[in-house]
Image (tube, grey):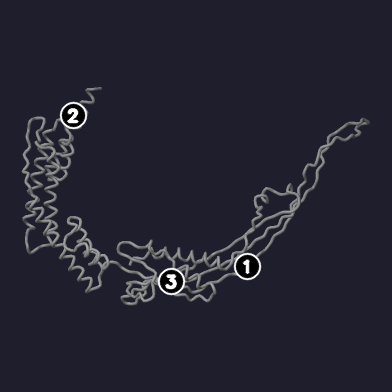
Amino acid sequence: MKTLMYTLSLALLIVSCRSVNKMVEKGEYDKAFDYSVSKLSGAKNKKTEYVKALEKAYDRLTKSSLREINRLSDPSKPQNYPKIHDLYKGIMDRQDRIDPLLPLVSEDGYTASFDMKDYSKEMSDAEENMCAYLYNHALNLMAKTDKTGDRLHAREAYGDLTKILSYRSSYKDADRQVEKALQMGTTRVDIRIFNDLRDFMSYNIERSISELPVSRLDNRWTDYRIAVKGNDKSDYTVWLDLEHISFSPERERSNTYSETKEVLLKKEKVKERRDSVDVWVEKEVFEKVRADITEVFREKQSELHGRMRVTDNRNGEVIRTVPINVLHDFKGYGCRYTGDERALTQGTKNKLDNNLEYFPADGQMADNLANAFKDAVMGEIRKLRL
């Protein structure tokens, strides 16, 4: 068993070494670097194959990064500074991962050599150049938003400014500019109600709908709000048109029926003459019982009809219209009986209900309609892509 385990371990080691060598041969230096570091970290006996693979991968990656930095280092192309910064950061990150392994000597006595340099000044210069570029680029983008009204420029500027702040929390006035970019990049949507209901409940319904929980719809770049008088700076308006409401008459009908059953009343012994002989026999005495059942059905319906219109305030165009129709259907039921309960079938027993609901008032039904209307509106607004 021990021989088998040793053989399997040796086979896995050979396959593993071949795989890292294959990565190096194929030029997959990032993979070879990561794999070698994972195998060498904490290993008591460091395999020569991993040590050499790490040495070669680090050398090739560093030289490649420095060549790319040299190519990008053109003062006339400040847009390259973020990339230069990332390349220096990559070099330093790799050095930080190798440092705990040094000095790196394999189990066969091979000592790896790494060209480790301090790039902190270059990193600092690259960070300064990157921040300066991103800051100026963000200001230019916000100026484009001012000129064209295209909020996408401001949103890109927000990304630039937040990247600056992730490195330098007090760079110039970047914190103030990021708030400005957020404001400029936000699409504002007003929700307004047009109440054309001809009913005494119309005010209550409008007031209920005006309490839409629109803050739940907000995200980073979209701000919904119930419009207030004098507010005319929105990008879009969601109009909620209340067009028609109706309440049906209260309708009640009843259904009465009877059920009967013969039930055993008692058993008694009686004398009978059979073949000139008196004998005592047991007889069952049945009684017919009856129950009268009354079912009461109550119904009342209410409906609220309207629509949602979305207008682009930049050109006044209606970009979406959706009908919104909600129904509240009240159904009350009661079932009682008089007479003998023993006459009831199981089906009737299951229907018995002494709690016959009262008809809801129009005001209560109007509240239910308003809540259903709000739920439908919230669902439709979530579908918008503004």
Q: Which mark is residue 250?
A: 1
| C-alpha span from label 1 to label 3 | 29 Å
| C-alpha span from label 2 to label 1 | 88 Å
Q: Residue at x 13, y 51 (%)?
A: 89
> Which amino acid type is marked by label 2?
Leu
* Residue behind mark 3: 240
Report which quarter residue 68 is drawn in: bottom left
Q: Residue at x 13, y 45 (%)?
A: 94
Q: Is residue 323 above or below residue 25?
A: below
Report which quarter residue 22 is drawn in: top left
Report which quarter residue 335 is drawn in: bottom right
> Which amino acid type is marked by label 3?
Leu
Q: Secondary structure at mark 3?
A: strand
* Residue behind mark 2: 10
| Front position in the image: 366 or 176 | 176
Please tell me which of labels 1 and 3 falls first in the chain. Answer: 3
Q: Secondary structure at mark 1?
A: loop
Q: Residues within 10 Å of mark 3 (few under 14, many from 20)?
A: many
| Front position in the image: 13 or 30 | 30
Q: In this rendering, which labeled residue sits more in front, label 2 or label 3?
A: 3
Q: Position of residue 121 (x, y in %)?
A: 7, 52
Task: Determine the residue located farthest toward the right in the rendered image.
Answer: 276
Q: Secondary structure at mark 2?
A: helix
Please tell me which of labels 2 and 3 falls first in the chain. Answer: 2
Q: Residue at x 68, y 58 (%)?
A: 295
| C-alpha span from label 2 to label 3 | 74 Å
